[in-house]
Image (cartoon, grey):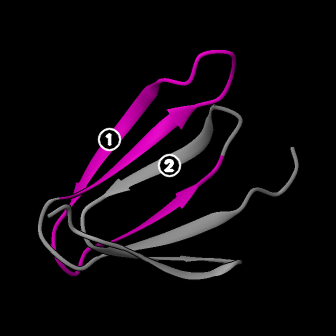
Amino acid sequence: MAQTEYIVIRAQEDGVNVIGLTRGNDTKFHHTEKLDKGEVMIAQFTEHTSAMKIRGKAEIHSAHGIVESETKK
């Protein structure tokens, strides 16, 4: 199996949701985690996970740089 990329998600507020989306013909939610302020999650794209959706204010670190998500207003 080829080396897969990791991302680091650091919650900036309570209740940040990290949602894994499946790979294949139909994209579906397959896993959800909730992070509170200051918590960090290290996630990996796999043969089953093709995308991740992050809801809430968080800092996302990857090989491509740092991105910040925002709180829905």
User: Which image quadrant is residue 61 in?
Assistant: bottom right
Q: Is residue 30 above or below residue 57?
A: above
Report the predominant secondary structure element of the magenta stretch. Answer: strand
Q: Position of residue 39 (x, y in %)?
A: 25, 74
Q: Quadrant of the N terminus?
A: top right
Q: Residue at x 68, y 15 (%)?
A: 25
Q: Is residue 34 above or below residue 41?
A: above
User: Which image quadrant is residue 31 in?
Assistant: top left
Mark 1, other Cα within 10 Å: few <14 / some 14–19 / many ≥20: few
Q: Quadrant of the C terminus?
A: bottom left
User: Which image quadrant is residue 66 in?
Assistant: bottom right
Single out the mark in the foreground, 2 or 1: 2
In the rendered image, residue 33 lying in the magenta stretch gets the answer yes
Q: Residue at x 51, y 59 (%)?
A: 43
Q: Which residue is mark 1?
A: 32
Residue placed farthest to the top in the image?
25
Question: Real-space Cα distance between discs 2 and 1?
Answer: 10 Å
Q: Residue at x 16, y 75 (%)?
A: 13
Q: Amino acid at mark 1?
A: Thr
Q: Which residue is mark 2?
A: 52
Residue 61 is tagged as none
- The magenta span reads 16-45
Residue placed farthest to the front in the image?
73
* Label 2 secondary element: strand
Mark 2, other Cα within 10 Å: few <14 / some 14–19 / many ≥20: some
* Label 1 secondary element: strand
Give left or right: position of 7 versus 30.
right
In the rendered image, residue 34 lying in the magenta stretch gets the answer yes
Whichever of callouts 2 and 1 sits on the residue coming sooner in the sequence is: 1
Q: Position of residue 64 (x, y in %)?
A: 70, 78
Q: Residue at x 88, y 50 (%)?
A: 2
